[in-house]
Image (spheres, rainbow, N blue to C red):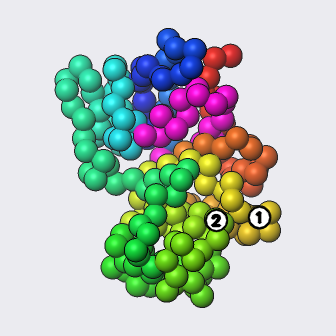
Amino acid sequence: MITVSIEKKLRTYGGGQALKLAAEFLTGSVTKIYGPSGAGKTTLLKMLAGLVRPEKGKIVFNGETWLDTERNIDMPPQKRKIGFVFQDYALFPNMTVREHLQYATHDDAWIQRLLAVSNMTTFTSHKPAYLSGGQQQRLAILRALATKPQLMLMDEPFSALDTQIKIVLISELQHIFNELATTVLIVSHNLSELESFDGNVLYVGNQ
């Protein structure tokens, strides 16, 4: 279980806005996050990952304190065992598809499985510049999954995929998440594309 209680000032055009959230996410659950632009959805993911620190707050993952601002505890990202799918993919331009996955894991059987479920097997020698936007997005998802993370954070992970590929990939991801008992948080502006995911919905923003 992840227990989160955080307060973070946000940089917005209007100024003075803050993200305040208290929530619990069960182990192995999927939470679909939505809300208006600038409400702090991506910031929430980055705080869970340890990439952004709130002014005040506490994050506890399965009994282990990742963040406690009062006690000055802030576990570094590399120790949090997470997978993060960034909205801009954050791929390495000089690495091939296979090299991206080998950078994350030495388990060749797992790499082959990820390539197969995402229909990326024929692109293993391609670098990002030679992939379409949808292929780059799938690679970003595979790289995040390669470490078999306890927590998977996904920021608009399906925005570049056509409908048929999206349906198939989401189905495969559901099986993998269940198998690994991965806790998943997905930010999306289009909740309808996530209907096949069993899970909760979290609104971030002023209501």
Q: Residue 55 appears at what percent x and percent y?
A: 34, 20
Visible residue check, residue 22: no
Picture layout, residue 155 above or below residue 90: above
Q: How many marks?
A: 2
Q: Which type of secondary structure does the marked residue at label 1 adopt?
A: loop
State the image coordinates of residue 141 (x, y, percent, origin top left): 54, 63
From the viewer's side, name the closer residue of 164 and 38.
Answer: 38
Q: Earlier in the sequence, mark 2 or mark 1?
A: 2
The amino acid type found where label 1 is placed reads Asp
Badge number at residue 162: 1
Which residue is at the far top?
16
Q: Is residue 28 magenta?
A: yes
Q: Quadrant of residue 101?
A: bottom left
* Secondary structure under the numbered disc 2 in the rendered image: helix
- How far across and how far down the image is residue 187, in percent? 60, 43
Q: Is residue 150 left or right of residue 131?
A: left
Q: Quadrant of residue 176?
A: bottom right
Quadrant location of the C terminus in the rendered image: top right
In percent of width and height, residue 88 lies at 54, 53
**Magenta-drawn segment:** 27-46
User: How far separated are the C-alphas under marks 2 and 1?
Assistant: 10 Å
Residue receiving disc 2: 133
Residue at x 39% of width, y 53% of height: 82
Q: Residue at x 66, y 66 (%)?
A: 134
Q: Residues within 10 Å of mark 1 (few under 14, many from 20)?
A: few
- Name the kind of residue labelled 2 in the image: Gly
Which image quarter is the N terminus in? top left
Residue sitting at x 74%, y 69%:
165
